[in-house]
Image (spheres, rainbow, N blue to C red):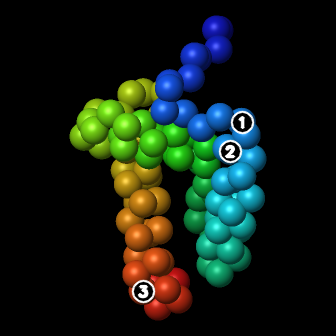
Amino acid sequence: MTEQRPYPSDLSDARWALVEPVLSAWRADRRGRGLDIGRPCEHDLRAIMNAILYVDRTGIPWRYLPHEYPPWLPVVRRIITSIALQAYGPAVR
């Protein structure tokens, strides 16, 4: 199978190197606060970030995300959680 060409909105490797430690720490922290039950994370953090950037850049509705990205609902949940954490801090956790 051929490798997919990146979209112009996708994170470069250099930018991903800056963002990845913060996102991975956030994911580990969220996972550590729970009982470690339930499904493990199934979507790649870089793919989620690329989907967010794609929608921001193109202005398409979330439900119109191309199939190369994770389903739109987990991506939107990620954004809502981030906004809630910024607005309300530890009360959301």
Residue 8, percent from left and from top: 50, 26
For marks 1 and 3, give the CA distance: 32 Å
Nearer to us: label 2 or label 3: 2
Judged from this view, the residue extending furthest toward the top is 2
Question: Is disc 1 surrounded by few (<14), some (14 to 19) or many (20+) residues within 10 Å?
Answer: few
Q: Which mark is residue 88?
A: 3
Residue 69, percent from left and from top: 48, 34
* Secondary-structure class at tag 1: helix
43 on left or right of 22: left
Image marks 1 and 3: residues in contact by CB distance under 8 Å: no
Q: Which mark is residue 13?
A: 1
The mark that comes first in sequence, 1 or 3, is: 1
Image marks 1 and 2: residues in contact by CB distance under 8 Å: yes
Q: Quadrant of residue 3?
A: top right
* Secondary-structure class at tag 3: helix
For marks 1 and 2, give the CA distance: 5 Å
Identify the residue at image location x=44%, y=52%.
Answer: 74
Q: Quadrant of residue 64?
A: top left
User: Foreground: 72 or 23?
Assistant: 23
Q: Which mark is residue 16?
A: 2
For marks 2 and 3, give the CA distance: 27 Å
Residue 1, percent from left and from top: 65, 8
87 on left or right of 34: left
Amino acid bearing label 1: Asp
User: Foreground: 87 or 71?
Assistant: 87
Residue 47, percent from left and from top: 56, 40
The mark that comes first in sequence, 2 or 3, is: 2
- Note whether 69 is above or below 87 in the view shown: above
Identify the residue at image location x=43%, y=50%.
Answer: 75
